[in-house]
Image: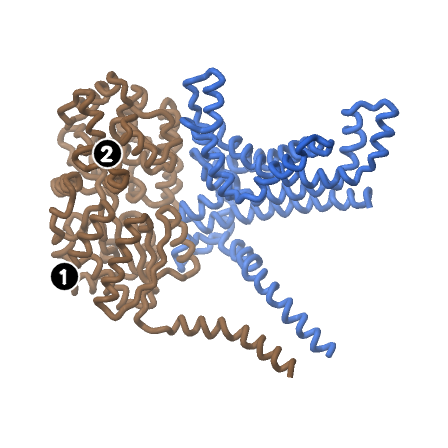
Chain colours: A blue, B brown
């Protein structure tokens, strides 16, 4: 009976392992393999180039452009939703009227797909009749028609704002949950001792919210690394590569220029960067665990 | 017993997909798989009608999987990389077909072409430019488009314009008149980059000529050459003079077409597919809108027409070779099929036996213009290999963003294009 159960466990585990292997491990290994070739997606008789694709990366100005944009993207995707989520949580944690409605409203964007969020913000940014420019026009600039997504100076930041708008709800909910675990007596004592509201937040609330911050940062980081779809729908990495992140650059090289081998080399570099970031993060996480148990 | 049943269920669960896959794989030799990018309401309906006709006329059954125009480019690459191309798929003649022919991913169709006598069916200019690759035929032209200057007739009339320009001076004067009448002369929606390419195509073709352009497209000339500087310089003069709508990179081609249709702008340089779009909005060809060919610029330069040719190609590893060839032949050689298709799609037929009276007045003139042209040239992104086209398309949107950086842009593109050709 025991051996039969073990057989079933193996069989039942085999399916998810098989799915994971086929959908994750195999493509990952394939990317490594193709990164050493000049495969274009169509040709079966590709050649092995050794490390030439990786050498090319260091002379590719668009790759470095993508590195800079990815750094900006990740930094902003970590900082903006975290800070705005914390701010909203602190605001709504006080017993304000309609807090429940506000919580629902602020959380709603996270339920939408990135494609829908992207489309909403494309309309908001539309230069002639978009919401943003309409407000600017009403504020006394009737000829204002700045094309937020079509100008290289603003395209990436415009997408970051849209992305942060969507992600803020998630941070807010996690911080709200964290705030409920802070004993109100502790804050009352601080108040009696003469601590100002800002001192209470800075010295008591924020340190006690560290476990929540760890979760928020982890989710923001993972989501920002995955953040391809909203860029794809809003700018496609444009105009002229100004909002290219590494993922976008990899896509453009692979699927628009048909350089699958080179695209695979970029994906390997992206994988190593992600692995490093996640490694550093988990190391820090262990330290936090040691402190907070 | 329970155990046997469990094992039986598990076995069935594992075996069922395998049996289904095997059944599908060996269904019969009558199934032909096809994928295409004609997914607009009219195009999809018209294509399905042709499929129905084909199935009624033959023993073959078509398994159709349409994919949206832009997504198709990625989809077909994904299918190719997975070694699962459909038997037949639509594709754009020119450098894109050349690219996959060079990758040995297509099946030659010389025997079918000869047996069906397609030399007497397909217009020679189209056959010469669109079907032959590396000495063999690979593509059956399905329809083609022509790019011209499409304009709003009411706007021109209101500005007192009763004569259409045939040369560059006339064109600039036309723009000036429209500007003076408070109408932006030219709408361009280069958000997706490709709509800007027709300006580069025509300016280069009309100044440096088709031979130079062919050399540039093949990597035998540089984007830093005086010919390219001259053509782009003329484009810059138009932008600097304020003849283009603002924020071109923020508009799609339909946004630009809407601006012309509404009268916010007077004209747009676009392919004949704009007629299908405008007709769908209720505009009447010849009454509400018309077109004129891109004006001549330099004397002694062959007058070229620019446009894409949509074709059908066959995968090198097609499972049903006979069925695929039968479908290709049916789609191009049947004049009724071609007439119905071109009407629905707002395209010109590649079949010389299609009665031109099937076209509306605008399409008929487009047909005559192409017929009278000395050269038919593919538009930029179909004339140069895909990795280079990506470089050039970005150049157009960068130029439209800041034309003052033209010199810097061309120097950069010359380097990037050279590197892309070496790949």
Quarter of the view holding residue B238: top left
Relative side of A166 to B86, left or right: right
Per the image, label 2 sits on a secondary structure element best described as helix
The residue drawn where x is 62% and y is 33% is A80
CA–CA distance in space, label 2 to label 1:
34 Å
Image quarter in which the N terminus of chain B is found: bottom right
Per the image, label 1 sits on a secondary structure element best described as loop
Relative side of B355 to A191, left or right: left
- Label 2 with label 1: CB-CB less than 8 Å: no
The residue drawn where x is 36% and y is 29% is B248
The residue drawn where x is 13% and y is 43% is B371
| Location of residue B68 in the rendering, given as x and y in whole percent from the top left corner | 37, 49
Is residue B273 visible to us here?
Answer: no
User: Looking at the rendered structure, which numbered label has been put on residue B202?
Assistant: 2
Q: Label 2 crowding class (10 Å Cα cut-off): few <14, some 14-19, many 20+?
A: many
Choose the circle earlier in sequence order: 2 or 1.
1
Relative side of A258 to A69, left or right: left
Task: Find disc 1 in the rendering and name its residue.
Answer: B117
Instruction: Report whether mark 2 lies on the same chain as mark 1.
Output: yes
Is residue B282 visible to us here?
Answer: yes
| Location of residue B79 in the rendering, given as x and y in whole percent from the top left corner | 41, 57
The residue drawn where x is 27% and y is 27% is B263
């Amino acid at each position: 009976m025991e051996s039969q159960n073990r057989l079933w466990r193996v069989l039942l585990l085999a399916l998810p392992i098989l799915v994971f292997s086929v959908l994750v491990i195999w493509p990952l290994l394939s990317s490594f393999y193709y990164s050493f070739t000049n495969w274009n997606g169509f040709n079966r008789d590709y050649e092995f180039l050794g490390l030439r694709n990786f050498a090319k990366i260091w002379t590719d100005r668009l790759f470095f452009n993508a590195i800079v944009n990815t750094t900006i993207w990740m930094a902003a995707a970590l900082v903006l939703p975290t800070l705005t989520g914390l701010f909203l949580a602190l605001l709504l944690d006080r017993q304000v009227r309609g807090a429940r409605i506000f919580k629902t409203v602020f959380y709603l964007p996270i339920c939408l797909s990135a494609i829908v969020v992207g489309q909403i913000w494309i309309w908001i940014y539309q230069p002639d009749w978009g919401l943003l420019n309409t407000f600017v026009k009403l504020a006394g600039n009737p000829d204002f028609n700045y094309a937020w997504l079509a100008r290289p100076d603003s395209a990436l930041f415009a997408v970051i704002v849209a992305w942060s708008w969507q992600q803020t709800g998630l941070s807010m909910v996690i911080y709200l949950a964290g705030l409920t675990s802070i004993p109100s007596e502790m804050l009352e004592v601080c108040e009696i001792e003469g601590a100002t509201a800002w001192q209470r937040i800075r010295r008591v609330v924020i340190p006690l919210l560290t476990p929540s911050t760890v979760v928020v940062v982890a989710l923001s980081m993972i989501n920002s690394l995955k953040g391809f779809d909203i860029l794809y729908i809003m700018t496609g990495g444009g105009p002229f590569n100004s909002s290219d992140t590494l993922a976008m650059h990899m896509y453009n090289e692979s699927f628009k220029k048909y350089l699958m081998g080179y695209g695979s080399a970029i994906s390997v570099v992206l994988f190593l960067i992600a692995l490093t970031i996640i490694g550093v993060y988990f190391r820090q996480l262990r330290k936090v665990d040691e402190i907070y148990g | 017993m329970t155990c046997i049943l469990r094992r039986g269920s598990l076995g069935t669960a594992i075996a069922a997909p395998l049996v289904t896959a095997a059944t599908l794989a060996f269904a019969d030799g009558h199934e032909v798989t096809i994928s295409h990018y004609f997914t607009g309401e009219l195009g999809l309906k018209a294509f399905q009608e042709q499929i129905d006709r084909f199935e009624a006329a033959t023993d073959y059954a078509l398994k159709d999987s349409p994919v949206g125009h832009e997504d198709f480019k990625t989809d077909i690459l994904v299918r190719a990389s997975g070694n699962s191309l459909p038997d037949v798929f639509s594709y754009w003649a020119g450098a894109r077909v050349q690219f996959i022919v060079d990758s040995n991913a297509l099946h030659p169709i010389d025997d079918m072409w000869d047996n069906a006598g397609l030399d007497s069916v397909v217009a020679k200019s189209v056959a010469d430019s669109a079907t032959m690759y590396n000495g063999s035929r690979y593509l059956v032209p399905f329809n083609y488009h022509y790019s011209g200057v499409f304009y709003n007739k009411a706007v021109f009339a209101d500005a007192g314009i009763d004569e259409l320009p045939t040369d560059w001076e006339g064109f600039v004067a036309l723009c000036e008149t429209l500007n003076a009448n408070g109408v932006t002369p030219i709408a361009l929606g280069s958000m997706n980059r490709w709509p800007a390419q027709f300006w580069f195509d025509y300016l280069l073709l009309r100044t440096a000529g088709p031979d130079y352009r062919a050399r540039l497209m093949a990597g035998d000339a540089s984007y830093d050459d005086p010919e390219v500087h001259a053509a782009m310089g003329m484009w810059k003069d138009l932008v600097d003079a304020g003849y283009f709508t603002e924020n071109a990179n923020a508009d799609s081609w339909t946004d630009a077409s809407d601006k012309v249709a509404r009268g916010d702008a007077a004209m747009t340089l676009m392919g004949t597919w704009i007629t299908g779009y405008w007709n769908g909005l209720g505009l009447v060809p010849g009454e509400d809108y018309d077109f004129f060919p891109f004006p001549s610029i330099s004397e002694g330069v062959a007058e070229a027409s620019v446009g894409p040719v949509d074709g059908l190609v066959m995968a090198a590893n097609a499972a049903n070779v006979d069925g695929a060839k039968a479908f290709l032949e049916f789609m191009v050689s049947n004049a009724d099929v071609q007439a119905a298709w071109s009407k629905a799609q707002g395209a010109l037929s590649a079949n010389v036996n299609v009665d031109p009276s099937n076209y509306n007045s605008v399409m008929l003139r487009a047909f005559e213009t192409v017929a009278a042209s000395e050269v038919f040239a593919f538009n930029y992104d179909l004339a140069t290999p895909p990795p280079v086209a990506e470089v050039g398309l970005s150049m157009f949107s960068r130029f439209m963003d800041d034309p003052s950086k033209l010199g810097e842009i061309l120097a950069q593109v010359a380097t990037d294009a050279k590197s892309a050709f070496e790949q």
